[in-house]
Amino acid sequence: QSVLTQPPSVSGAPGQRVTISCTGTSSNFGSNYDVHWYQQLPGKAPKLLIYGNNNRPSGVPDRFSGSKSGTSASLAITGLQAEDEADYYCQSYDNSLSGSWVFGGGTKLTVL
Amino acid sequence: EVQLLESGGGLVQPGGSLRLSCAASGFTLSSYAMTWVRQAPGKGLEWVSAISGSGMSKYYADSVKGRFTISRDISKNTLFLQMNSLRAEDTAVYYCAKDRSQWGAYGLDVWGQGTTVTVS
């Protein structure tokens, strides 16, 4: 059971817009810690997609955007492309107990 | 170019030990927090351990606390993960990753290719 909750899967047709939700708690998002998003292509290492809730590293297309409000966050992908098919993970910091980095369980995006 | 290269994975019996290494290039370990993240076969990402840029603060997931130790050698710009009392559930690909800040929790912007640990 992951600290951050994501849907196991989402899907969309090429060109469509999809969103992936990530639900936290008072000890992570509710304590004002940022959410970060990673894309993991099959057989590859994760790649930072969004940091600090809604910032894109250099080289990430503006089709990817993030938002956070209260104890919820979401990743939006517009103009869906076949190469977007991957696993997506949200991540934050949690100040419960001794503190830790926490990940969501991951969402498999299928491009139909 | 900023890069991380892990090594040290392999097959080990339950109860055994392994030391993973992560050689960093293109940046200085002492300027950034570093983490270890693992991924069991067919599963999601799991945070394992982290060390602050100063090296003064070390953090561990409850699942590895007391068994794993994170450390670094600044002269070699290399991060380590000493894993003792290994269990079958520690089987995973282990990634080292660089945080965007020296304190941690600002996003992991550089990842290694991963090294596979099999406990059997």
Image (cartoon, grey):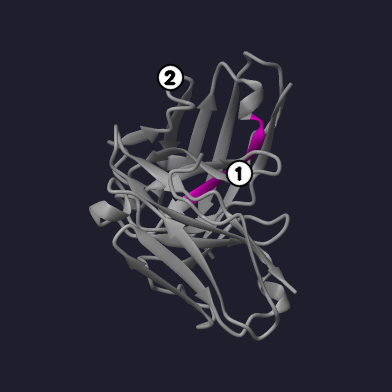
Q: Main secondary structure of the magenta part?
A: strand
Instruction: Please tell me whether mark 2 sits on a helix, a strand or a loop.
Output: loop
Residue B55 visible in the picture = yes
Mark 2 or mark 1: name the one nearer the start of the chain: 1
The quadrant in which residue A40 appears is: bottom right
Left or right of B60 in this view: B17: right
- The stretch in magenta equals B91-97
Q: Do residues under tags 2 and 1 come within 8 Å of each other at their CB atoms? A: no
Subunit ID for the residue under disc 2: B
Subunit ID for the residue under disc 1: B
- Whether residue A112 is situated above or below residue B46 in the rendered picture: below
Circle 1 sits on which residue?
A: B6
| Identity, as a three-letter code, of the amino acid under mark 2 | Gly
Left or right of B67 in this view: A39: right
Circle 2 sits on which residue?
A: B66
**Nearer to us: label 2 or label 1:** 2
Asked whether A54 or A69 is in front, the reply is: A69
Asked whether A39 or B27 is in front, the reply is: A39
- Whether residue A81 is situated above or below residue A35 in the rendered picture: below
- Whether residue B54 is situated above or below residue A67 in the rendered picture: above
Where is residue A72 shown, x and y percent of the image?
37, 61
